[in-house]
């Protein structure tokens, strides 16, 4: 295994995962909606390709340009926090287009080559939100939980072809561009009626007991890629691991 294609490498977990695999000596295809070479170390083993996971044409072009790959990391994602009642169906569809249908489309784009070679790994980056319910995250959690369910099911049928499928479940990282990238989408999603309920939740988020770093996620993606067992779940980050412990008690 030595070529990985990662989605959403312009910042955050994806960027760090690309750096991590490069440092491990892998060939890395770092994909971004707007390609930028300067944010990654210069290396012959690195290719930066354009990819928008919501566009079938973009997916076909990126997979064609990439050539054979051994590992796909579906990292690209967008967030939305707010009262479900106030979250428009337009926003819900937008979130699902990237977090859910984008991941499905990427999986379908690589499975034929993996099946033909009887090998390959797909890592789907979901969220610790899929591990335990949290308030004001309904649409986002739904988009990621759909992928958790899909991944668990598909892992069985693809195991028959020597393909491994894994879930990486990161916790909350205040240091990525996630909140900033979702800022406009979240405007007005806490109506006055929800303000008193939301206030302590946002205060707790501003002072988290534990968080996830980009390096935590990159390391756990590496671990998941190299895990030859049928283990499906890989929580990443101190907060996500604490959640797993709390929910398994
Ligand atoms: N940060 C957290 O607290 C947290 C917690 C749990 C899980 N996650 C998950 O971790 C993953 C990475 O998030 P992050 O925290 O690193 O956030 P980030 O810094 O915002 O990175 C997200 C990446 O996804 C890309 N992206 C968005 N829409 C895309 C599309 N349609 N096609 C291709 N790429 C697209 C972004 O590219 P652009 O620069 O073009 O927008 C960016 O590169 C996401 O799946 C997220 O849901 C994050």
Image (spheres, grey):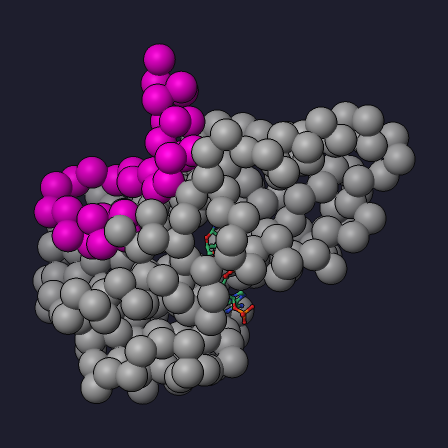
Pick the front one: 196 or 76: 196
- Residue at 50% from the left image edge and 42% from the top image edge: 172
Q: Which residues are magenta?
A: 220-249
Q: Residue 46, image x and y in percent?
A: 27, 80
Q: Is residue 11 magenta?
A: no
Q: Which residue, as the protein is rendered here, is positioned at the far right?
A: 192
Q: Looking at the rendering, which quadrant does residue 202 occupy?
A: top right
Residue 158 visible at all: no
Q: Residue 107, image x and y in percent?
A: 34, 62
Relative height, residue 211 to residue 105 (above, below): above
Q: Looking at the rendering, which quadrant does residue 19 occupy?
A: bottom left
Q: Which residue, as the protein is rendered here, is positioned at the far top?
A: 249
Pick the front one: 4 or 19: 19
- Residue at 82% from the left image edge and 48% from the top image edge: 188
Q: Is residue 233 magenta?
A: yes
Q: Looking at the rendering, which quadrant does residue 83 occupy?
A: top right
Quadrant, the N terminus? bottom left
Quadrant, the C terminus? top left
Q: Residue 136, image x and y in percent?
A: 67, 35
Relative height, residue 112 to residue 179 (above, below): below
Residue 20 visible at all: yes
200 left or right of 58? right
């Amino acid at each position: 295994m030595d070529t990985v294609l990662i989605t959403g490498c312009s910042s955050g977990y994806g960027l760090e995962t690309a750096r991590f695999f490069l440092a491990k000596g892998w060939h890395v295809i770092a994909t971004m909606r707007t390609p930028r070479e300067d944010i990654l170390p210069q290396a012959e083993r690195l290719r930066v390709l354009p990819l928008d996971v919501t566009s079938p044409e973009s997916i076909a072009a990126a997979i064609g340009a990439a050539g054979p790959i051994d590992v796909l990391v579906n990292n690209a994602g967008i967030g939305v926090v707010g009262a479900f009642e106030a979250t428009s169906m337009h926003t819900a569809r937008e979130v699902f287009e990237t977090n859910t249908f984008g991941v499905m489309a990427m999986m379908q784009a690589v499975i034929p080559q993996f099946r033909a070679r009887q090998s390959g790994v797909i890592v789907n980056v979901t969220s610790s939100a899929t591990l335990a319910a949290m308030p004001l995250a309904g649409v986002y959690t739904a988009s990621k939980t759909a992928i958790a369910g899909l991944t668990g099911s598909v892992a069985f049928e693809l195991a028959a072809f020597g393909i491994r499928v894994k879930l990486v479940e990161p916790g909350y990282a205040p240091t990525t561009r996630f909140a900033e990238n979702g800022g406009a989408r979240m405007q007005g999603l806490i109506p006055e009626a929800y303000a008193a309920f939301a206030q302590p939740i946002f205060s707790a988020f501003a002072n988290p007991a534990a968080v996830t770093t980009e390096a935590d996620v990159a390391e756990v993606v590496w671990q998941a890629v190299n895990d030859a067992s049928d283990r499906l779940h890989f929580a990443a980050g101190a907060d996500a691991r604490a959640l797993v412990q709390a929910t398994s008690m």
